[in-house]
Image (spheres, helix red, strand yellow):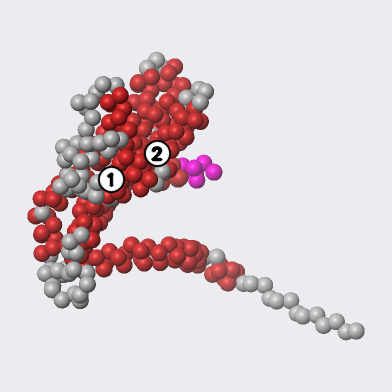
Amino acid sequence: MTTVQSAPLPPKSAGAYAKDHSPRSNGRRTAMLIVVLLSPAIALYALFVFAPLVQAARFSLFKWNGLGPLEDFVGLENYANVWADPFFHTALLNNLAVIAVSLAIQLPFALWIATLLTGSFRGRAILRVAFFLPYILAEVVAAVLWSFMLSPNGLINEALRSVGLDTVAHPWLADPNTVMYAILWVVTWKYFGFYTILFMTALQNVPQEHLEAARIDGASRAQVFWYVTLPAIGPTVRISAFLAIIGSLQLFDLVWVMTEGGPVGASSTMVTYMVSKGLRTYQFGFASATAVTVAMMSFLFAVVYQRWVLARDNQVDVKEGKRTHVAH
């Protein structure tokens, strides 16, 4: 039996090898890989974020009830009417109040709880679960529970009456003077557990040798926290503030289920205001202008925050990466 042997292939020339492994070729392959991996996410983003925003921007230029064709072109009149509406001013102020409470109360409280839970004591795991439980509850479930508890005959008022504070018992969600305070309480209770977990993770990553060095130098606990711990967890604090502000601008579920923005618009936010205009009065062009306004406010804030606040953290990460690369 005759065996046929094929001639060996000629080796690649140095030029061909250099061409296949040149920086330009590697960069092209990397770019193609990035495009392939990001394609599903980009497609979903374009379908569920960009396309609806473009559609809303188109609707906002018309006076439209959502039923007939787009014929009554009004240009920027809907935007002017949004900013001229005193109910929108109330909604905007309510969003700003949520932002203020989130930054001044919710985040500091979460950081304080996180510092307590990073210590070593019995029952720490149970407390962590207890503090995180409000966050894992669905917004609708939490809103329904608090609606019952804050009702005139709910748990809160009954508890006040049971200790002789009948005069303090109050229809919290039905009074325009108290409804927003109740909303702010529920928002703080609902989300502080999320920031507690973020801060706990950051605190556990603080180098212990830095803390020990500060203590050896005679720094008090307050000084160690202010000059060592807080700067070390600064990136987490800044990210948490960003998430709190963006979430406050887009607050909807809790408010809508508890009060639908009432009474008399006292607890409305910009998003509940938008939904009310669209679904109750069928002013879909007006509601679309509100939606675009909220989206642009969030986008502009994100750009400014990224440029002036988070850019510092990005530069530090790049420098640290360069140092690590040089060390290796």
Q: Which residue is mark 2?
A: 134
Sequence-wise first label, 1 or 2? 2
Q: Position of residue 93 (x, y in %)?
A: 17, 44
Q: Position of residue 295 (x, y in %)?
A: 25, 56
Q: Residues within 10 Å of mark 2 (few under 14, many from 20)?
A: some
Q: Which residue is mark 1?
A: 258
> Is residue 202 visible in this depiction of the protein?
no
> Is residue 221 visible in this depiction of the protein?
yes
Q: Looking at numbered disc 2 in the image, what kind of residue is underneath it?
A: Pro
The image shows residue 229, relative to residue 92, as above or below, that is above
Q: Which residues are magenta?
A: 323-328
Q: Position of residue 128 (x, y in %)?
A: 46, 32
Give the camera-side residue of 24 and 47: 47
Task: Give the quadrant of the N terminus.
Answer: bottom right
Residue 211: quadrant of the picture: top left
Q: Residue furthest right?
A: 1
